[in-house]
């Protein structure tokens, strides 16, 4: 329980953060550094500063407030007074983050009660748009898939797969003209085009499941697996509930990149047939078109624009949350020579300028590729 509001018993009270509370790594958010904290019981997430996190990380029930205060003073050169403790412990307690504290703040309790009244109602769906969960327990499904196929994520299997994917894309670039011609011919053959479209849709489904399986490998929880439609588009989706709380940034990057890798793995046998098996012209063109469209599908997901997987990867490389919005705000301030831009630490300035420059280069590359494709099609 938290201490009474009028006094904090620094000699006796040993605060304990609930063991199921999720705490993220340090992220940049604007000019600040924050940690994200999630209460799994209420589903609410919060931002806390680095100093608050310093204390929360040590609230394991073995330290009293005096000891916590001494460690804080040694780190930051200042002791916390009773008013500081009251604010911090009150915030943690009312949000249901302390062992023995309330489950949720009063406002959240009311919100939760209102939500609970409609929890059994299905999400609103219409003919034009909606979602449909496909499994009752998505986390258990992802766990079963990981037990069945997780061995492929080990280095002896993954390294050769990545090398094969790299070789396939090198060949695709070297023979890009053939792939473009094959894709052009494919669009004139409705039967083969339908077959390729079905394979690409199946690849998209595996893309989503790959996110869930890799997240499960690193301790993530899969909240939902289902279908989402915005007619005429119907796709599968897989929601990783605690992506930002995975233990390391490399676990988060691996989870984000898993989908594109799966898309490319699906293409490997078709690439082998195209390269090494004698086939008729129509089949060869269909395979070439599949390789081009499948590669574009996979690589497009790695473009660093929200909400694509590439954006999540870029955010993790920059150590930021809300990367796009923070970058736009910093660049706006910097261009206007606003004094507020000077408040951004060097790490933030580097991350936001790097992301902005990288995004512009990627956008320019996409435009150049589209122009080159149009020129090639017109010339042929």
Image (cartoon, rainbow, N blue to C red):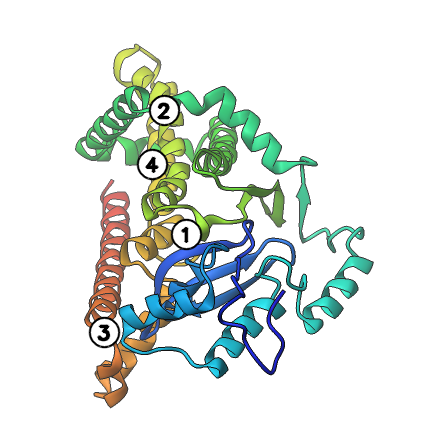
Q: Is residue 366 left or right of residue 311?
A: left
Instruction: Indicate whether 96 appears above or below 287.
Output: below
How busy is the neighbourhood of tag 2: few (under 14 within 10 Å), some, or many (20 plus)?
many
**CB atoms of marks 1 and 2 within 8 Å:** no
Q: Is residue 276 left or right of residue 196?
A: left
Which residue is depicted at the point 55% across and 30% down?
143
How busy is the neighbourhood of tag 1: few (under 14 within 10 Å), some, or many (20 plus)?
some
Q: Which residue is mark 3?
A: 345
Count of numbered badges drawn on the protein: 4
Q: Is residue 369 left or right of residue 118?
A: left
Q: Depth-wise, is mark 4 or mark 3 nearer the camera?
A: 3
Instruction: Indicate whether 37 appears above or below 308.
Output: below
How busy is the neighbourhood of tag 4: few (under 14 within 10 Å), some, or many (20 plus)?
some
Q: Which residue is mark 4?
A: 295
Q: Which residue is mark 2?
A: 287
Regarding mark 2 in the picture, which secondary structure is present there? Answer: helix
**CB atoms of marks 3 and 1 within 8 Å:** no
């Amino acid at each position: 329980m938290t201490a009474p509001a009028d006094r904090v018993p620094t000699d006796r009270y040993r605060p304990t953060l609930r063991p199921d509370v999720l705490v993220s790594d340090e992220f940049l958010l604007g000019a600040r550094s924050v940690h994200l904290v999630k209460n799994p019981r209420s589903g609410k997430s919060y931002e806390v500063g680095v100093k608050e996190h310093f204390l929360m990380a040590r609230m394991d029930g073995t330290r009293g407030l005096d000891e916590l205060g001494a460690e804080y003073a040694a780190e930051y050169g200042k002791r916390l007074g009773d008013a500081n403790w009251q604010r911090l412990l009150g915030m943690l307690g009312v949000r249901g983050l302390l062992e023995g504290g309330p489950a949720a703040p009063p406002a959240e309790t009311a919100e939760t009660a209102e939500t609970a009244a409609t929890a059994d109602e299905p999400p609103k769906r219409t003919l034009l748009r909606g979602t449909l969960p496909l499994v009752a327990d998505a986390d258990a499904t992802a766990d079963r898939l990981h037990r069945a196929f997780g061995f492929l994520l080990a280095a002896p299997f993954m390294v050769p797969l990545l090398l094969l994917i790299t070789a396939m894309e090198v060949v695709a670039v070297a023979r890009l003209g053939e792939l473009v011609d094959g894709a052009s011919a494919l669009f004139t053959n409705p039967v083969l085009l339908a077959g390729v479209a079905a394979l690409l849709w199946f690849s998209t489904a595996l893309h989503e499941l790959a996110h869930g399986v890799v997240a499960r490998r690193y301790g993530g929880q899969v909240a939902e697996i289902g279908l989402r439609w915005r007619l005429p588009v119907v796709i599968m989706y897989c929601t990783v509930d605690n992506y930002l709380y995975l233990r390391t940034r490399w676990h988060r990057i691996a989870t984000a990149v898993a989908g594109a890798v799966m898309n490319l793995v699906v293409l490997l046998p078709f690439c082998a047939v195209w390269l090494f098996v004698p086939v008729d012209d129509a089949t060869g063109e269909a395979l070439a078109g599949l390789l081009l469209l499948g590669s574009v599908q996979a690589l497009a997901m790695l473009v660093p624009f929200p909400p694509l997987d590439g954006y999540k990867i870029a955010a993790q490389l920059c150590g930021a949350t809300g990367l796009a919005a923070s970058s736009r705000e910093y660049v706006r301030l910097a261009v206007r020579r606003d004094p507020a831009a000077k408040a951004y630490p060097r790490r933030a300035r580097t991350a936001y300028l790097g992301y902005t420059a990288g995004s512009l280069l990627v956008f320019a590359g996409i435009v150049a590729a589209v122009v080159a494709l149009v020129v090639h099609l017109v010339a042929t």
